[in-house]
Image: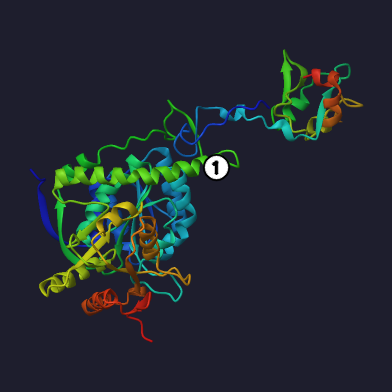
């Protein structure tokens, strides 16, 4: 029998803070930044009201926030934080240390553009900037997914011994109020269980040295371990999702497909835009167009074989990137998709769309125009390989 | 230093972890010394000033008497010789390559 739920109206930030309250981590160290501020602000209220047992460390910067999280996690505590954009950028140095030390920290990141020009609105530049940092990255389409992903992230992180970033889209999800099913405190507590680390600094029975200098003789081996851990995390993510479904009823995978089975043209998009795309898929299906959607849930690890398999019937693909690599090449998601397709030797038409930078709205008509482009491309009509969708010429 | 077989990534503990306590002792840090202190027992008054000053705890003392130096950790800084209060010094600094050539000196350890 699925667990009892309470149906409430929550913003993405409120839903993530609620998940953190129910997870009741040992330590949260954080510094405020728009649009993620509320997550830790609301959580600090829970600490002040005695609703959690967490040690809350208000620090002087995001670099310090991640440093404090690393210390707390290494000591053995279940540790969480939240940030966005420039804050994540300032953490970047420490993010690599957290993953290298295999510390299962969970970070709620509200996707926001990077400066300059200064902008507080959504795009995926911040998360993409740290895509090679050794953190698992989970994208959320809406507040419900953000809540569910936070709860699963704790388990995934600790099982994989890898830190996890759970993202929402700035303002669109973080400040948009939606219906969210909240589980009972007891059920979440049971699901996340108690942290069991193989090594931790406060374990006096098994003393360790952590973070020793690692030169030509061992660094490479440790990085190889990290690469393997990321590869193995795919199975862990699926296991946790299966257990989550068993307890709470909602199903999750490495990605979600929407009417993709017999689709001939498909959009690949992450985060809130996937929701917008579903509306257009429904509309096109009614008109007899075989349109579909693939929404990667985890960008790291990148489920390349699984995605290629899911796209097998598709002839034309549009990859929607809410960030740019500024490399005279495609956006980050498209690069991954093309590399995956190339490996499997399947020749398909792949178009790349850079969209929504700095919170530029992506409208239903925009999505519809992409499917129209795909239709034309299927008929041999040449199309730009990279389109900046929604920009003024 | 003996050449041990290094572990592969599958055998190492997860992450940059070294298991067990007090492992710094296993890391012999004296191998980049360019000079080494050599004890002159007939001049030494065993005041243990060198033992107090040595930053690497490399002065070996037995029953209150200096017996030599722990060359596994001594970095040859020369503080012991500098601080030795005995007239004419009970410690002399010798070039490491010279010392290694001379087996007699090596045996003082």
Q: Vertical placement of A140 versus B37: above or below?
A: below
Q: Residue A238 in the image: state x and y as whole percent.
A: 26, 46
- Is the residue A250 above or below the residue B88 in the image? below
Q: Which residue is drawn at 23% across and 55% down?
A: A147
Q: Residue reaching furthest right?
A: B88
**Residue at (7, 43) in percent of width and height:** A1
Residue A88, position in %: x, y?
42, 60
Using the image, determine if residue A283 lies above or below residue A128: below
Chain letter for mark 1, please: A
Question: Can residue B95 be seen by looking at this rendering?
Answer: no
- In screen coordinates, is A281 left or right of A295? left
Can residue A132 be seen here? Answer: yes
Task: Report the residue that reaches farthest toward the bottom.
Answer: A393
Image height of A379 relative to A135, above or below: below
Q: Which of the image's four quarters has the C terminus of chain B? A: top right
Residue nearest the observer in this picture, A312 or A250: A312
Residue reaching furthest to the top: B63
Q: Which of A107 and A331 is in front in this view?
A: A331
The residue carrying mark 1 is A219
Quadrant where the N terminus of chain B lies? top right
């Amino acid at each position: 029998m699925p667990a009892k739920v309470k149906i409430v109206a929550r913003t993405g930030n409120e839903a993530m803070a609620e998940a953190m309250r129910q997870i009741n981590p040992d330590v949260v160290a954080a510094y405020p930044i728009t649009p993620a501020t509320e997550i830790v602000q609301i959580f600090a209220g829970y600490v002040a009201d005695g609703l959690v047992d967490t040690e809350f460390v208000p620090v002087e910067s995001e670099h310090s926030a991640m440093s404090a999280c690393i210390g707390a996690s290494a000591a053995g505590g279940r540790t969480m934080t939240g940030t966005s954009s420039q804050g994540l950028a300032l953490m970047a140095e420490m993010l690599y240390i957290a993953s290298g030390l295999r510390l299962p920290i969970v970070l709620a990141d509200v996707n926001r553009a990077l400066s300059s020009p200064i902008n507080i609105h959504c795009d995926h530049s911040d998360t993409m900037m740290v895509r090679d940092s050794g953190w698992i990255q989970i994208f959320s389409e809406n507040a419900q997914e953000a809540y569910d992903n936070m709860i699963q992230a704790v388990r995934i992180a600790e099982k994989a011994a890898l830190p996890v970033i759970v993202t929402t889209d700035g303002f669109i999800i973080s400040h948009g109020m939606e219906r969210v099913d909240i589980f009972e405190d007891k059920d979440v507590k049971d699901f996340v269980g108690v942290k069991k680390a193989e090594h931790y600094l406060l374990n006096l029975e098994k003393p360790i040295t952590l973070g020793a200098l690692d030169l030509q003789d061992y660094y490479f081996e440790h990085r190889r371990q990290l690469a393997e851990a990321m590869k193995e995390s795919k199975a862990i993510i699926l296991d946790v999702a299966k257990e989550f479904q068993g307890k709470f009823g909602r199903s999750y995978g490495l990605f979600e497909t929407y009417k993709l089975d017999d689709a001939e043209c498909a959009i690949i998009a992450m985060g809130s835009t996937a929701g917008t795309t579903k509306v257009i898929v429904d509309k096109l299906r009614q008109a007899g167009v075989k349109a579909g959607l693939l929404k990667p849930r985890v960008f790291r690890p990148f489920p390349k074989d699984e995605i290629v398999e899911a796209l097998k019937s598709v002839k034309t693909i549009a990859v929607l990137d809410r960030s740019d690599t500024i490399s005279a090449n495609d956006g980050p998601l498209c690069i991954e998709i093309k590399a995956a397709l190339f490996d499997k030797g399947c020749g398909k038409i792949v178009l790349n769309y850079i969209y929504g930078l700095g919170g530029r709205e992506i409208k239903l008509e925009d999505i519809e125009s992409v499917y129209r482009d795909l239709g034309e491309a299927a008929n041999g009509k040449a199309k730009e390989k990279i389109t900046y969708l929604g920009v003024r010429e | 230093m003996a050449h041990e077989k290094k572990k592969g990534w599958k055998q190492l503990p997860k992450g940059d972890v070294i298991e067990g306590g007090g492992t710094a002792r296993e890391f012999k840090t004296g191998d980049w010394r360019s000079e080494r202190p050599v004890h002159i027992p007939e001049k030494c008054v065993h005041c243990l000033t060198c033992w107090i000053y040595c930053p690497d705890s490399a002065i070996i003392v037995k029953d209150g008497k200096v017996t030599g130096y722990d060359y596994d950790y001594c970095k040859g800084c020369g503080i012991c010789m500098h601080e030795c209060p005995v007239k004419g010094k009970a410690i002399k600094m010798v070039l490491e390559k010279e010392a290694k050539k001379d087996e007699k000196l090596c045996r003082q350890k």
